[in-house]
Image: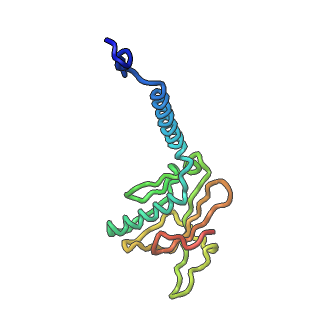
Amino acid sequence: MILETGPASRPRSQAGFTLLEIIIVFALITLASGVIITNFTSFLDFDDKINPEDSLRSAIRYARFQAASNRSVATLIYDAETGTLVVVGGESFQLNSNFGREGRGEIRFYLMPPAEGLDRFPDAKSSLMETKKLSFAPDRSSSPFVVEIDTGEGAPKRFIFDPFSSLVRSEE
């Protein structure tokens, strides 16, 4: 049958994909796999990115919380064998690969003599009373203490902590 305007046109079948659709799908797959591979490789290097200062602050906060919630003294120690900070009877906090048996890093705790009255705390540099553990009372307080983090790379850092919070009073 012929119409006045020309021969009758047949509708085109839409079976299959166009080249543009296939290219877009491949681009999305490539983008998604790139994101996954990047996240996976950063996960593999996670041990090197653990900051010992952050782990120390987390361990102190956790020990204070445990002391208050259990209404008993909580103790924080550094386990040189495993390279972790351990709250006795609770959690352990991982440090990076500089610590532990194979690492050269070390964490040392020092007690400071308390201040008398409204006087200032004694100088932290003169604090040589090394201790193996820090104790936190149920009221979340502790004796004034200093923590020295020696990563084995460069000079050790000393942190003077407030005895009533997890805040660092000063860094040396």
Residue 108 lies, in percent from the top left, at 56, 62
20 vs 36: above or below: above
> Where, quadrant-wise, is the C terminus in this rendering?
bottom right
78 vs 5: above or below: below
Point 48% across, 60% down: residue: 77
Left or right for 141, reference 52: left
Name the outermost residue toward the front: 4
Residue toward you, 130 or 100: 100
138 vs 102: above or below: below
Point 53% across, 46% down: residue: 47
Left or right for 134, reference 68: right
Residue 84 lies, in percent from the top left, at 49, 53
Residue 64's quadrant in the figure?
bottom left
Left or right for 2, reference 169: left
Point 60% across, 69% down: residue: 171
Residue toward you, 164 or 21: 21
Q: How is the image coloured?
A: rainbow
Residue 148 lies, in percent from the top left, at 59, 63
Point 45% across, 75% down: residue: 164
Residue 141 lies, in percent from the top left, at 43, 74
